[in-house]
Amino acid sequence: MSNVQSLERALTLLNIMSDYPDGIQISRLAEKAGLSKSTIHRLLGTLLNMKYVTQDPKTEKYRLGYQVLYLSRNITANNGLISAARPFLEALCEDINETIHLCVEDNAEVVYIDKIESSQTIRMYSRIGSRNPMYCTGVGKILLSGMDEDEFKQATASIDFVKRTAKTIDSLEELKKEIDLVKQQNYALDNIENEEGIRCIAAPIRDFSGRIVASFSVSGPVHRITMERIHDELIRKMRETSKNISRQLGCQI
């Protein structure tokens, strides 16, 4: 099916504005969207009327309106996965004091659906609702490891193996070897593959049928998430948390 151009453009504006919580000028918005100011102005008029966008009368900047929250109310409030996982992820975060992400797959990408911040400072670019590739993230590798052959082929067919760091996997053959290893060990690493200086360990969450439906990760700077700490502490705690959350979803493991 072909895209409706005006709808596609309006949604593009919303996506751009989501990166500017303090608002963005119309000229900058036009530049980011690659559209004329007159086109942007027409689209914003509709979005303003429907309360998906608001404008600061002093700065004249545009930002997302509260109607966007209304759209997502049932995803966040009634998502059984989030409510089942959060107590265990919070307990894990309190125990190890590192940032934790909860993720699912959507259109062959990782989507962050929950995040528990540690009290330690760390510069990471993730936030709830943001996306990342599957091939260079621990959470993505876990999700790929739970796919059957056809699902895996579909999910990896359009991957552009961009080298985000020197350690990023850069071929399908290398990714397949990595996923075989993930299946054997029941955890995955992002060993400085997605962000410089950041290492992550991820584990699966399974539903009542034993199928991997989500993944979660512990992330931190390499001087805290050392390979020694991973083997001495984190693998055991990740597996325990994985088992506890999966049991909440009816998995008999």
Image (cartoon, helix red, strand yellow):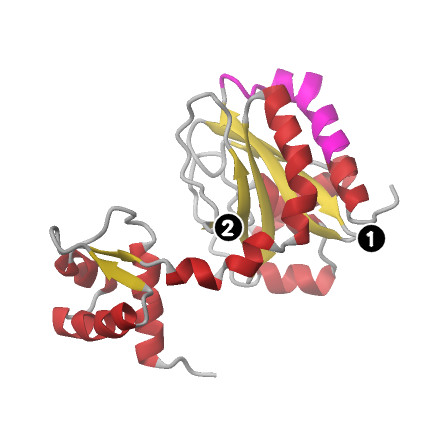
Cα–Cα span, label 2 and label 1 = 27 Å
User: Can you name the residue that lies furthest to the right here?
Assistant: 252
Closer to viewer: mark 2 or mark 1:
1
Q: Position of residue 149 (x, y in %)?
A: 73, 61
Residue 236 lies in the magenta-colored region: yes
Residue 59 in the image, given as x and y percentages of width and height:
12, 51
Which residue lies under the disc numbered 2? 133
Does 177 appear above or below 166? below
Highlighted range, magenta: 223-241
| Residue 231 spot, x, y in % from top left | 69, 20
- Could you say which quadrant of the image residue 15 lies in? bottom left
- Foreground residue, 134 or 129? 129
Identify residue type, mark 1: Phe
Residue 174 in sight from this viewpoint: no
User: Which residue is at a point 32% across and 50% down the rendered structure image?
Assistant: 19
**Which residue position is annotated with label 1?**
208
Query: In front here: 61 or 171?
Result: 61
Residue sitting at 31 percent across and 70 percent down? 10
Closer to us: 134 or 85: 85
Q: Left of 252 or right of it: where is 61?
A: left
Q: Is residue 206 above or below residue 187?
A: below
Q: Secondary structure at mark 2?
A: loop
Residue shown at 30%/78% (left/top)?
A: 6
- State whether the magenta stretch is mostly helix, strand or loop: helix
- Note whether residue 99 is visible: yes
Give the residue type at disc 2. Pro
Q: Is residue 82 left or right of residue 67?
A: right
Q: Residue at x 53, y 51 (%)?
A: 111
Which numbered disc flags the more N-terminal residue, 2 or 1? 2
Q: Using residue 84 as the reference point, say whether residue 120 is left or right of it.
A: left
